[in-house]
Structure formats: structure tokens, C-alpha cells
Amino acid sequence: MFDFLVSFIPRAVMQSIPLLYGSTGEILTEKSGNLNLGIPGIMYVGAISGVIGAFFYEQSVPAAEMNAFLAIAIPFLSSLLGSFLMGLLYCFLTVTLRANQNVTGLAMTTFGVGFGNFFGGSLIKLAHSEVPSIALSATSNFYRASLPFADRLGWFGQIFLSYGFLAYLAIAIALLTAFLIRKTRTGLHLRAVGESPATADAAGINVVRYKYLFTCFGSMIAGLGGLYYVMDYANGVWSNNAFGDRGWLAIALVIFTIWRPNVSVLASILFGGLYILYLYIPTGTQFAVKELYKMLPYLVTLFVLIIVSLRKKREDQPPASLGLHYFREER
């Protein structure tokens, strides 16, 4: 049993990091009153933007001469830029033009996947790859590097210290986001905008600025989830449509954690474990049963949603103005 846990937990953690980035970014977005269902597309754009930066850096510098700082910084900043632009586009459509948030989010998911597949396919052709994927192994090695003494600490090192820096950054961002929302004046203003933008506006809070700022910031955080998936989890290998349903799982995780980023740290590991549980349960050739096991994270989310709805506690509910437009002239 112990050996099973030592093997299972690190894999669950690695599965959980993209979900943690996505859910933290979406929580921050939803706290401003914006319901962004485009998170899967934003994560996809964050991934391909990082891949583009890494690809051209690897093409211009031999692997032996690569600078560790640049190998990390170029894909990192490229990913942030791509996801920021997606968040900015979402805000322009929904906050400035007041387009329907649900439709806009779904359209951005479709656009993000198409954008990633187009540029991913283009890079594969540029690399003259014989398979429908490209490998950025040199850059990935910098992202996947763990603490040098982790291997010498046995099970403790394997469970807690065997991950790349993006995994620890995800946890830090989630905890800092929870602190920002609950313990700072900026977080108080953000929650006021999400609960009652008219009241926040009357108190002198710039509603449009908060919606733009935190939606874009949340999108940048979510984009890092895509970067982690490619550079760390997938060992630097990009192939079209390989991201799966992780973006939707991240949105489900927001509901599961009742809009609390600090709870997402452990909940994402639970989701990551449930996501790969079918690999550890013997099902033989019954592939349909394996697919049913993949439903577990969503079933757990539905169960939590039902319980929360029955309890009707205000602090467990989404922001009151979530998904609604604010018309200042109607204040």
C-alpha cells in the first residue's frame, strides 16, 4: 500500500497542477463578476504561445549553449502574453461591448483550440517532423529540473520535492490569491464588484478597471497551466488536441472548492488522482469501464454542488452578479 501511494501521489500531483492554475485564474475572474468559460481555450493559447517562444529559441541557439534563464523566461513570458491577450479580448467583448458571457467564453474556447492547432501544425511543418508532434526537450529539461537532493531523501523527496518550479509556483499563486481576496483592501473591492457592482461604483470603486484587471490577470494564471502541461508534464512534446478536458476540469474545480483558491491546492490533487485512477484499477479489456472512471471528478463536483445548494449558505454561493452585465446608467 505504501509503495502504491509513493507511486500514485506524484502522478496525481503532476495531473493537478494544470487544474490548479486554471481554477485559480477562473476564481479570480469570477470574483470580479465575469464568468469566463473560455478558460480551456486560454490554457491552450498559453501552451502554444510558450511552445512558439521555446521553439524559436531552440532553433537559434545550440542545446549546449542555451542559457537557463532565457530558456525559462522566453516561453514563460510568451505564455503570459498570449493568455493576457485572450483575457483582454474577453473583457473587450463582455465588459465594453457587453456581449453574452456564456457565448463569448465558449467561442473563445473554440478559437483558442483552433489557434493552438493552427500554429502547432505550422511549427511541426517548420521542424520537418516525421510524426505529428514536436519535441522541445532542451527547454523542457530546465522546466522539469527538481531539487538536486530530492533523490537522496527517499519517499519524502519523491512525494514532495520531485517537481519542477512551476508546480511550486502554482501552489504559491493559489495561496497568495486566497490572501489577496480575503485579507486585503483590493480583495474587498474585488468582492464588492462581483457581488454588487452598482454598490461598488457608488462607493467610488472603478468597476470596469477591476473587471479588466482581474480577468486578464486570471487569464494569465490559467495560461501557465497550459505551459506546465507541455513543458513539464508532457516533457516538452506538443501535439495537437493532446490537452484533453483539463480546462473543463479546472472550471469544475472552481465549483468544487466553492470559490476558494487555498482549498484548490488539495482539491486539485484529489481531482488529479481521480483523473488517473482508472490506470490503477484493473478493468481488463473493458474500455467502457475505464471511461466511466474518468467521470469521477465531474460526479464528485455534481455531488458537492447539490450539497452546497441544499445548505444555502451565502458564503458558499458564487458572486451575486456573476455572468451579469453592469449598466451604470441603471444604477
Image: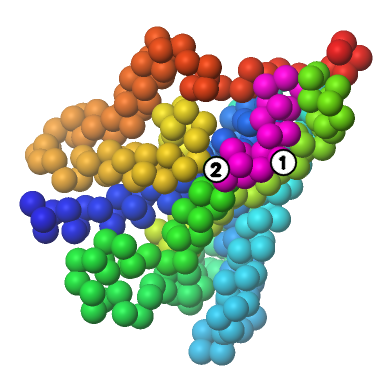
What residue sits 62% from the left and 70% below the top? 73
**Can you give x and y, in whole percent of width and height, for residue 283 in the image?**
11, 37
- Amino acid residing under circle 1: Thr
What residue sits 47% from the left and 53% below the top? 171
- Amino acid residing under circle 2: Ala
Over which residues does the magenta segment extend? Answer: 179-197
Classify 10 Å Cα crowding around label 1: few (below 14), some (14-19), many (20 and above).
Answer: few
**How many numbered marks, from 0 up?**
2
Mark 1 lies on residue:
186
**Can you give x and y, in whole percent of width and height, for residue 285 in the image?**
12, 37
Q: CA distance from mark 2 to mark 1?
A: 12 Å
Determine the secondary structure under disc 2: helix
What residue sits 11% from the left and 58% below the top? 3
* Side of 133 relative to 127 (left or right): left
Mark 2 lies on residue:
178
* Side of 239 relative to 219 (left or right): left
Q: Quadrant of the C terminus?
A: top right
Residue 317 in view of the camera: yes
Determine the secondary structure under disc 1: helix
Classify 10 Å Cα crowding around label 2: few (below 14), some (14-19), many (20 and above).
Answer: many
Above or below 309: residue 181:
below
